[in-house]
Image (spheres, coloured by chain):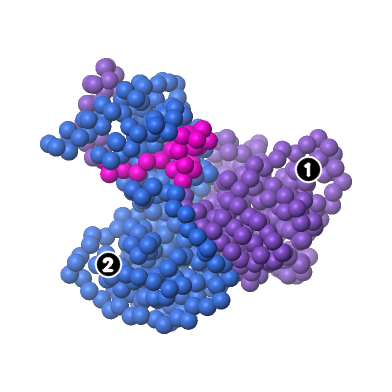
Chain colours: A purple, B blue
């Protein structure tokens, strides 16, 4: 099977966000594999181990994305592809990213593509469904279980807490939700092996695209931090009094009751 | 005149609140626009269309088909593209719900348009959306193509209902076919009560709730308040409640008017799901708990002592 994973690097969850010159300051920040993409990598490895084939992890990013790609290879993926847009794109959006991925996948034989259901940085959740549409293959989002039998896929998907059981067929794109699996940590031998695994680097020229083809349809006008919250009021006294005071504050000060 | 489509979402034939919010969002994008509600389903479609008009839409287009009973990407895309072909709108507004998240990117792809997802505010032609789990915000605008946005439920207030308001409701015949994903079964796990992502008040429990029985006082308080019950990942991982209740980075994102956190320490992943709530109350034994840093009001104490007393006080308030 030809198994592909769409991966993105994101800020570490614990990272504090700072703005410098109108953009999010990335210098010195720790980057990780987007947590939902980790589920996708883990599931891809399991599919390969059960059905044979090869796992290719694809990222649209910059030179620094190599670190997360090596981590994915250390987890057990076979090949990595970095589409480096650093020199070509000043501002891109999901439309741009999908144009690039579409061009990459034109030359690939695909059985299944797995992605995170959302990235925890910009959180648009658009790339998976948009790419499936461009490739004209079915997609299922926020999956929590996947069984493949021949060309048939039986899937459980999370719909705001309810479960939908879905039958569909390959080739297919899925986006992964928490609960699908427990992503493994790279092992030491895995990390050693990863250094020798193939990592192909492409630029948009290599995909017969130029900057105009991938020009964003949306633009970011401003980035800002939420207003600092004033310290809250911790109530004092006996529980009975605290509770009375709280209800009165919620009613007359906060006006939410 | 600008024409904007507002997508109504039905669940089991019932219209979801976020549907009304798409209409007021469309009015905020362009006050003078013609707002056309689009309603898909297999039952109560015409009633829902009339409701959309009462909440401010000018008219409505419906597609009724048994294949539209449950949301599927293929079925809803066919219906949506048929309406878009007929109406040629300048923009679309959908809820950032499970269905909206699944459908909107595909429609945007078909239209080769941009899409600004999960917006919480509209300022002229700029759209405000939280990024980095609510730790920052960005304002985005459309450079080229249709104005297409999905709105986070509970952030853009709906217009007042006007029962005397009327408008044209027209049915569009669409031959829905070749669904590539077949829904075999739907297992309801989310509670029958108030929809968590649309609730005005949320009562949430964490590890401090200690057991599944420990959630009972929270449910009693939620009943009195007409609130939905949620949970932290800690409480879900410990097996005190179903994952369908989870609020946070990997769960639901909620922005109620009032969020009452009971026995929740306030890990950053949890804050990602609730820190934009309008008013936050924290009840926790540990005065150092991080949740107090985001709370507007805090009570340091045992939730099993505080919550029942609070419930009694709230009941008393309602009687008066």
Name the chain under label 2. Answer: B
Marker disc for residue B74: none
The residue at the point 31 percent across, 73 percent down is B46
Find the residue positioned furthest to the right.
Answer: A196
Q: Where is mark 2, residue-wise?
A: B51
Residue A141 vs residue A170, the one in the foreground: A170
* Residue A156, position as x, y percentages in the image: 56, 55
Which residues are drawn in magenta? B225-248
- Under tag 1, what secondary structure? helix
Q: Residues within 10 Å of mark 2 (few under 14, many from 20)?
A: many
Along the line of sight, which residue is nearer the eye, A130 or B210?
B210
Residue at 36% over, 22% down: B302
| The N terminus of chain B - image quarter | bottom left
Quadrant including the C terminus of chain B: top left
Confirm whether residue A160 shows in the render. Answer: no
Direction top: furthest residue = A237
């Amino acid at each position: 099977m030809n198994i592909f994973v769409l991966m993105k690097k994101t800020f570490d969850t614990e990272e504090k966000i700072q703005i410098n010159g109108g953009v999010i300051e990335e210098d010195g920040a720790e980057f990780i594999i987007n947590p939902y993409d980790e589920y996708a990598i883990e599931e891809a490895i399991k599919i390969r181990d059960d059905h044979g084939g090869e796992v290719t992890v694809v990222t649209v990013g910059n030179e620094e994305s190599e670190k997360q790609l090596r981590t994915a290879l250390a987890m057990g993926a076979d090949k990595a592809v970095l589409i480096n847009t650093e020199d070509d794109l000043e501002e891109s959006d999901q439309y741009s990213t999908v144009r690039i991925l579409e061009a990459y996948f034109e030359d690939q034989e695909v059985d299944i593509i797995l992605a995170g259901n959302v990235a925890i940085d910009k959180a648009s959740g658009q790339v998976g469904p948009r790419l499936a549409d461009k490739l004209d293959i079915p997609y299922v989002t926020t999956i929590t279980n996947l069984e493949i039998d021949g060309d048939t896929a039986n899937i459980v998907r999370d719909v705001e807490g309810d479960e939908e059981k879905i039958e569909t067929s390959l080739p297919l794109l899925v986006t992964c939700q928490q609960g699908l699996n427990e992503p493994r940590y790279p092992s030491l031998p895995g990390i050693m092996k990863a250094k020798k695994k193939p990592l192909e680097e492409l630029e948009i020229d290599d995909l017969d695209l130029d900057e105009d083809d991938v020009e964003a349809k949306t633009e970011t006008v401003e980035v800002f931090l939420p207003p600092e919250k004033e310290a809250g009021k911790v109530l004092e006294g006996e529980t009975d009094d605290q509770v009375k005071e709280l209800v009165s504050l919620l009613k007359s000060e906060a006006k939410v009751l | 005149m600008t024409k904007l489509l507002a997508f109504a979402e039905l669940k089991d034939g019932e219209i979801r609140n976020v549907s009304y919010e798409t209409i007021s969002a469309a009015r905020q994008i362009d006050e003078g626009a013609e707002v056309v509600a689009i309603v898909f389903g297999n039952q109560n479609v015409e009633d829902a269309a009339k409701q959309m008009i009462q909440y401010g839409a000018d008219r409505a287009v419906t597609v009724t088909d048994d294949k539209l009973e449950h949301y599927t990407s293929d079925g809803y895309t066919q219906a949506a593209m048929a309406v878009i072909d007929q109406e040629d709108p300048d923009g679309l507004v959908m809820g950032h719900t499970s269905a909206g998240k699944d459908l909107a990117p595909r429609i945007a792809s078909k239209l080769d348009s941009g899409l600004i997802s999960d917006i919480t505010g509209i300022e002229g032609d700029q759209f405000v959306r939280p990024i980095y789990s609510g730790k920052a915000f960005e304002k985005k605008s459309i450079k080229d193509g249709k104005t297409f946005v999905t709105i986070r439920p509970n952030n853009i207030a709906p217009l007042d209902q006007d029962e005397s308001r009327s408008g044209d409701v027209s049915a569009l015949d669409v031959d829905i076919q070749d669904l590539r994903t077949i829904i075999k079964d739907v297992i309801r796990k989310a509670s029958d009560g108030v929809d968590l992502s649309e609730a005005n008040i949320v009562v949430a429990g964490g590890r401090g709730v200690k057991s599944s029985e420990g959630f009972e006082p929270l449910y009693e308080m939620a009943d009195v308040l007409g609130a939905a019950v949620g949970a932290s990942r800690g409480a879900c991982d410990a097996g005190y409640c179903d994952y369908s209740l989870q609020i946070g980075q990997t769960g639901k994102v909620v922005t109620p008017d009032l969020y009452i956190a009971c026995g929740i320490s306030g890990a950053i992943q949890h804050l990602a799901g609730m820190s934009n709530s309008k008013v936050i109350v924290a009840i926790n034994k540990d005065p150092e708990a991080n949740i107090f840093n985001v709370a507007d009001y805090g009570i340091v104490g045992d939730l099993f002592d505080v919550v029942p007393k609070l419930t009694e006080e709230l009941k008393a308030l309602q009687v008066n």
